[in-house]
Image: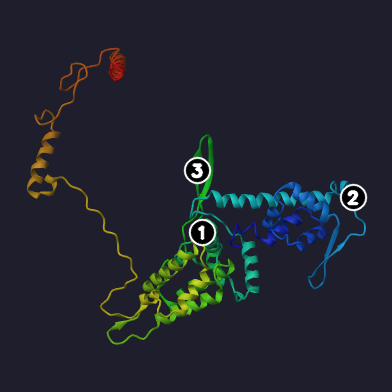
Amino acid sequence: MSSIGAQSKSVVAFGKAAVSFDVHESDFLVLLSDGIKTYESMGFRFPEREDFESYLKNTVRLKSAYRTADGELITFERVERPDWESFRSLEDAGCLRKLWTLAHQVAKREVEALASAPEGETKIKVTEAVSLELEETAVDRGLPPPGSDRERPSLHTLSRVQANFAPGGAFSHLPWKCYIDLEFEQRLKRQGCLPKDKPELTTKGNYVKVTSSAAEDFGHQEVKDLTVLREVLDIRARAFHLLSVMDYDVHVRLTSRYVSLLRQTPAEGFRRPTINELRRTDRVLFQDVLSWVAKGKGKIGDGVAYHLDDRNSLVWKLMILQPESVPDQGIDKEIAARPKRSRPEESDPSQQEEVSRRKRDDRKKGSPTRLLKLCLVCKKRHEPLCPLPPGFRKEQRLLNKQAKQKKREEQEKNKAREKEKKNK
């Protein structure tokens, strides 16, 4: 469900819309028997209204369906086939048209959002109903059922992962603080501490558009022990499996490798790798894999499995035992601030006192070193300034206008002379 938006590929949302539009059960089962289970499948199989009308005439009008006790769909030909003119005006046909209109708009809107969004800024939100549907499908594909909301990825986590790996997504390594459980998110929501999207106003011509920027990540800001590390990586493994990014079993192997590297027995005079060094190793590993996946070469699970099978991979060299005197290699070095530019006299201590004395003298009224203002009336420097006569500003503007006009005329004359010289 990671190719387009979550809503357009949701079977549950499609079924709810059919119920709310009073679509006949037999007609809806005919759609399901033909593989039309989502907004996406309906909107793109019948891109135009004429295509859907043809489907109603040649398929839905002629067939009926029912579901057995075992859940199997059985379709059969109708005994009494209504003529097309009478069927097209029935209420059941109108309900199906309403469902097609919604499916067409939802699928079209999500594709246009992916196409118009700047690269790496795709915004996709996963709702609670969609997350439960994803979980049900993932359990059928081998995901261990979660025991509680503590083991379920939050909606914020699923939305971030979905947007990151969608078409037009950034395909970047997400920090560990993005992966939080559903229980923690719900607790923040009850306490009113859940960060919300920030609205932004963008203008284009005479139109004003309100957009929303993603809220800041919230969660385990610092992973300092193995317990929190296991929880964060398990949430990431489940989120990746739910959205078909990576199989859960492959990520479990990766977590086991991380834990074994942190638990190495160091020799005398050496130390174990730190959590920060593991964080750097995880970032380097995924950046290497995603650099190929972003080009359409391979899958994320295959790339991670390749590094897991290769013990001599350079990625694991980042987790070797270090001497005790070596500092933590996982801490990013702070970027030194650029030194401020200073005047020569300010950098020389011997001249600072002279500069301070000069500034004090300049602040004194009547000081000979103080630069007086130029009077616009008499064109001399003095204080207080002469009062402006009536109409002085208007006269100055007129003079400036005449000077500009005269300069423009001279430029035109010069161009005419140069043109005559070239012609000669």
Give the residue at the far right of this rendering. 80
Relative to 269, 282 lies left or right: right
Q: Earlier in the sequence, mark 3 or mark 2?
A: 2
Q: Which mark is residue 194?
A: 1
Q: In the image shown, does 223 or 108 lie closer to the viewer?
A: 108
Q: Can you say whether 348 is above or below 2 in the image?
A: above
Residue 97 x, y percent position in the rendering: 76, 49
Closest to the camera, between mark 2 and mark 1, is 2
Looking at the picture, the colour scheme in use is: rainbow
Q: What amino acid type is highlighted by mark number 3?
A: Leu
Q: Earlier in the sequence, mark 3 or mark 1?
A: 1
Observer able to see residue 173:
no
Task: Identify the image quadrant of residue 369.
Answer: top left
Cα–Cα span, label 2 and label 1: 57 Å
Task: Identify the image quadrant of residue 375.
Answer: top left
Residue 28 x, y percent position in the rendering: 78, 59
Relative to 250, 102 lies left or right: right
Q: Which mark is residue 201?
A: 3
Q: Residue at x 51, y 69 (%)?
A: 300
Give the residue at the far front of this rendering. 424
Residue 387 x, y percent position in the rendering: 23, 16
**Circle 1 sits in a helix, a strand or a loop, which is it?**
loop
Contact flag, marks 2 and 1 (Cβ < 8 Å): no
**Circle 3 sits in a helix, a strand or a loop, which is it?**
strand
Q: In the image shown, does 259 or 93 lie closer to the viewer?
A: 93
